[in-house]
Image (cartoon, grey):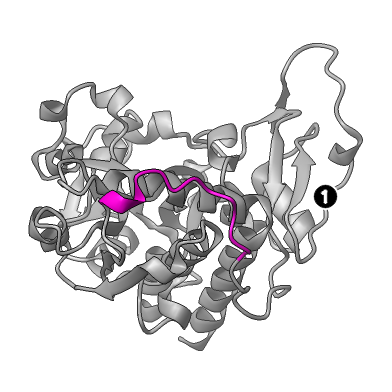
Amino acid sequence: MAIPLALGIKIPVSAAAVACNNSVQEYYVSSGDTLSKIAGIAFGDPKQWPRIFEYPGNARAIGKNPNLLVIGTPLRIPPCPGSVQEIPKEAAPAQTAKKSRNKIPFKIYVVTGDDWPPYVSTDWPNGGMATVIVEAAFEAAGMSDDVEIHYVNDWSAQLETLTKTNRYQLTFPWYYPKMDFWQTCDRLPKPMQIRCEYAHSNPIANVTLAFFKENGRADLAGETIESMNKKRLCRPKGYSTFELVENGITVDNLHIELSPKDCFQRLLEGVVDYVLLNRFTGLAVAAEMGIGSRVEMADISIASPIHILAYKNNPLETVQILDDFNVGLETIIDNGTYGQIISYFNDEFTRRLAKQ
């Protein structure tokens, strides 16, 4: 449902209808709107609502419940599914100030992993969605000749040694805790505390932490994030939980299983009510298990932004690189390149899912 911002609000004309094409469109929430309804009209498939939820700025405007929208809220509608046939070429360089560039190395070495599709993976076009966004942002910032990306499948080493010793100047993609919630680093879960030693970029992308449930569970209709503390939730071992705490979900009674498949098995056995996974992983695992038609994403979600990190105490002051990167990132968001990139990879995910 959609609720008014205030009595007597005047809704812009563009709220009367929503359509998508091969570019990013602006839409204002109208009476009766839900995110799934908007996705159904724009994309022809209400289950594609995460495409809208994840677009920069939308998740913050929408909040935790995609089906409780405020009338008049501006949303950006990304390109239609299937409208972007290839990865777009990077944007033309922006006029960015390169202050103190003499204090950083000519070549900026960036490290990422190779095992988190579709975000970073050499099995995906051009290294995955996050890699393409990072390269396009540096291109827009006029820095592409200075940047080289390497893959190291030891995520802990990326933070604990590789960037701290300046073998790499940047690392991505990483979640970063909301410090306005935690206040001090020592309140963070221990594995997260090291991230306080890093500065972070603006979000590269919003990862949808989805709540997967079994189809036909009428008793779970109308759930909210606030009601999750009364439900049985499953999260695989080793997966982060800080984002749950940030959103008011207690982890004391969380069911921990060895793998996403084990969580889904507990779901089908009726042991848990929801499996918590990013939407791409959840949908891919369900398809691999042959249970894609038996599970679905609930109409609630948590947006978890991912970033580039730079070690704060690097003697070469590499944190300043993030300023130029942010300018480039803003450029590709504003000129539509970003929307085409994420739309291409959403479609590529759909194509690969259909082959499983």
The residues colored magenta run 91-103
Is 45 or 202 nearer to us in this picture? 202
Q: Is residue 217 left or right of residue 50?
A: left
* Image spot of residue 195 (x, y percent): 19, 42
Position of the C terminus, as image quadrant, is bottom left
- Asked where in the image residue 350 lies, by quadrant, the reply is bottom right
* Image spot of residue 255 (x, y percent): 19, 49
The residue shown at (12%, 61%) is 162
Residue 206 visible in the shown view: no
Q: Residue furthest bottom?
A: 355
The residue shown at (32%, 32%) is 178
* Image spot of residue 206 (x, y percent): 46, 50
Q: Residues within 10 Å of mark 1 (few under 14, many from 20)?
A: some
**Label 1 residue SS:** loop
Which residue has dot 1 on it? 18
The residue shown at (29%, 44%) is 319
Residue 255 visible in the shown view: yes
- Asked where in the image residue 189 lies, by quadrant, the reply is top left
Say if the magenta span includes residue 214. Answer: no
User: Please, what is the dominant secondary structure of the magenta stretch?
Assistant: loop
Q: Is residue 218 left or right of residue 38?
A: left
* Image spot of residue 169 (x, y percent): 24, 57
Callout 1, which amino acid?
Val
Q: Residue furthest front?
A: 102
Is 240 or 295 nearer to us in this picture? 240
Is 98 or 215 nearer to us in this picture? 98
Q: Is residue 194 left or right of residue 87?
A: left
